[in-house]
Image (tube, grey):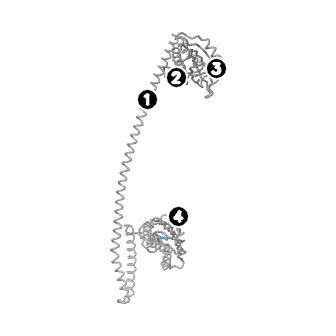
């Protein structure tokens, strides 16, 4: 909605020459209200086009220049009304040149009380001096005084405007060319960088692929070495078992009361042979077990196992080993229901091994086995009040033949824990240790309820 039009200038358009005057006055008014140079030219051009159209169509128009305040955007507009002197053909106005409408903000036909006007308007920039009623009065007076020039003057002015516009176009074209050049330069830089990055990436990729190849090769070698070690252990221990068993048998025969009596010294020596042979057989058996576990030849027999009878059996069999009166063996009753899917024989073997170690290394206090359900796992802990193990050896004791040096060396082979861990891994679980010297040890077997 447009309100409060403040007229600046009015003039009549009747003959060809008036077109120049209208054009010239249009530019003057546009300049007076503060439109920029290019907008002045646009207004003047649009005005002369519409003026020519109306002169040809109806023989002229009354032209009014005014400033309006637009209620919609709160800004001032220069408004030019051209009221035709006769009725427009078909009651409509359409500019001959379609480009005219683009020169101004609005170009409409406005039908008022009985009269019809062609109206164009252009917004006054905010940077322009404020058009107060006083200022408008000044402008009105100034425009009234300035006499319009001749058609030649207007032509000269028009030419100058054309030259200025051409200059501007040329300088814009030059700027564009410079910009294009800069853009092309940047593009070249980006492409070079991209190519360099691509090359570096390919180089890195080649390196990674080669590394992987090497890694695969090394893994295969490692696997082969581990397999031949297991095979060797299995073969050697198997081959040793028969002669060692024979030695034990022969020793028993020699010591038998039905054989020829031995001297005391002979009996002592035969006793030594027998106990050494028994140690050797134990070692050979453990080696064979470990080799079997490592070569993957142990197939767990998966069944639903109730921990309570397993614990009961361990309680019974290990009591015989708990010979020190200062050490108590405590096998707690597992909380019911204590069922999990596992291999009962292998699990019992692991727990027996851990309990046996506890009883072997603990001089006073207790060795305790307990079971606890944690989410979808069972945690079976064997804890003792023995000497404990320094943190830096927690992983080493799971290596084959490793035994903690010092007074805890009380026989054994150093194969029990690596074997136990192998078995627990086969059962889909983990075997870990928490221990400190002087504070005992706790071995934890964690097994999934549903098996591996
Ligand atoms: P072994 O008991 O036949 O020597 P293991 O593999 O079972 O072999 O144990 C390796 C070593 O770990 C043992 O020699 C011992 O030094 C240490 N160890 C194992 N269990 C305990 C324990 N409960 N308390 C203290 N030391 C232990």
Percent coordinates x, y for residue 135 in the rendering:
65, 19
Whether the residues at callouts 1 and 4 have beta carbons within 8 Å, the answer is no
- Using the numbered discs, state the Cα–Cα distance from disc 2 to disc 4 in whole angstroms: 79 Å
User: Mark 4, residues whose alpha carbon is within 10 Å: few (<14), some, or many (≥20)?
Assistant: few
Mark 3 lies on a secondary structure that is strand
> In the drawing, does residue 76 fall left or right of residue 291?
right
Mark 1 lies on a secondary structure that is helix
- Using the numbered discs, state the Cα–Cα distance from disc 1 to disc 3 in whole angstroms: 47 Å
- Using the numbered discs, state the Cα–Cα distance from disc 2 to disc 3 in whole angstroms: 23 Å
Disc nearer the start of the sequence (3/4): 3
Q: Name the residue under label 1.
A: 180
Which of pointers 2 and 4 indicates the residue nearer the eye? 2
Q: Mark 4 points at which residue?
A: 375
Disc nearer the start of the sequence (1/4): 1
Percent coordinates x, y for residue 254 in the rendering:
35, 85
Mark 2 lies on a secondary structure that is helix
- Using the numbered discs, state the Cα–Cα distance from disc 1 to disc 4 in whole angstroms: 68 Å
Percent coordinates x, y for residue 190 in the rendering:
42, 37
Badge number at residue 6: 3
Asked if 381 appears above or below 94 in the picture, the reply is: below
């Amino acid at each position: 909605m447009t309100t409060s039009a403040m007229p600046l200038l009015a003039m009549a358009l009747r003959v060809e020459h008036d077109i120049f005057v209208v054009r010239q006055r249009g530019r003057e008014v546009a300049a007076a209200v503060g439109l920029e140079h290019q907008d002045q030219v646009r207004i003047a051009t649009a005005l002369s086009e519409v003026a020519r159209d109306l002169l040809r169509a109806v023989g002229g128009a009354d032209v009014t220049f005014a400033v309006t305040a637009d209620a919609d955007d709160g800004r001032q507009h220069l408004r030019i009304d051209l009221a035709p002197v006769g009725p427009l053909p078909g009651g409509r106005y359409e500019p001959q040149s379609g480009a005219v409408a683009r020169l101004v903000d609005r170009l409409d036909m406005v039908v008022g009380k009985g009269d019809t006007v062609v109206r164009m308007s252009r917004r006054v920039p905010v940077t322009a001096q404020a058009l107060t009623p006083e200022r408008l009065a000044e402008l009105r007076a100034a425009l009234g005084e300035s006499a319009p020039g001749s058609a030649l003057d207007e032509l000269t002015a028009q030419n100058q405007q054309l030259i200025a516009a051409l200059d501007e176009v040329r300088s814009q074209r030059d700027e564009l060319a410079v910009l294009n050049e800069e853009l092309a330069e940047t593009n070249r830089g980006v492409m070079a960088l991209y190519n360099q990055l691509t090359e570096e990436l390919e180089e890195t990729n080649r390196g990674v692929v080669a590394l992987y190849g090497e890694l695969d090769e090394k893994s295969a070698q490692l696997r082969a070495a581990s397999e031949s070690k297991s095979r060797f252990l299995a073969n050697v221990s198997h081959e040793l078992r028969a002669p060692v068993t024979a030695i034990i048998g022969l020793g028993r025969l020699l010591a038998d009361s039905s054989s020829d009596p031995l001297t005391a010294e002979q009996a002592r020596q035969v006793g030594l042979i027998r106990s050494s042979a028994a140690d050797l057989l134990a070692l050979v058996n453990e080696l064979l077990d470990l080799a079997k576990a490592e070569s993957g030849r142990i197939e767990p027999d998966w069944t639903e196992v109730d921990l309570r009878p397993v614990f009961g059996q361990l309680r019974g069999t290990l009591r015989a080993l708990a010979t020190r009166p200062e050490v108590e063996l405590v096998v707690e009753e597992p909380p019911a229901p204590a069922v999990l899917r596992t291999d009962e024989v292998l699990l019992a073997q692991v727990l027996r091994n851990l309990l046996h170690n506890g009883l072997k290394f603990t001089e006073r206090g207790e060795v305790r086995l307990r079971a606890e359900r944690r989410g979808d796992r069972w945690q079976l802990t064997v804890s003792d009040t023995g000497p404990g193990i320094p943190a830096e050896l927690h992983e080493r004791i799971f290596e084959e033949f490793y035994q903690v040096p010092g007074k805890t060396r009380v026989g054994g082979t150093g194969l029990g824990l690596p074997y136990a861990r192998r078995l627990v891994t086969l059962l889909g679980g983990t075997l870990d240790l928490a221990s400190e010297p002087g504070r005992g040890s706790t071995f934890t077997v964690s097994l999934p309820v549903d098996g591996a």
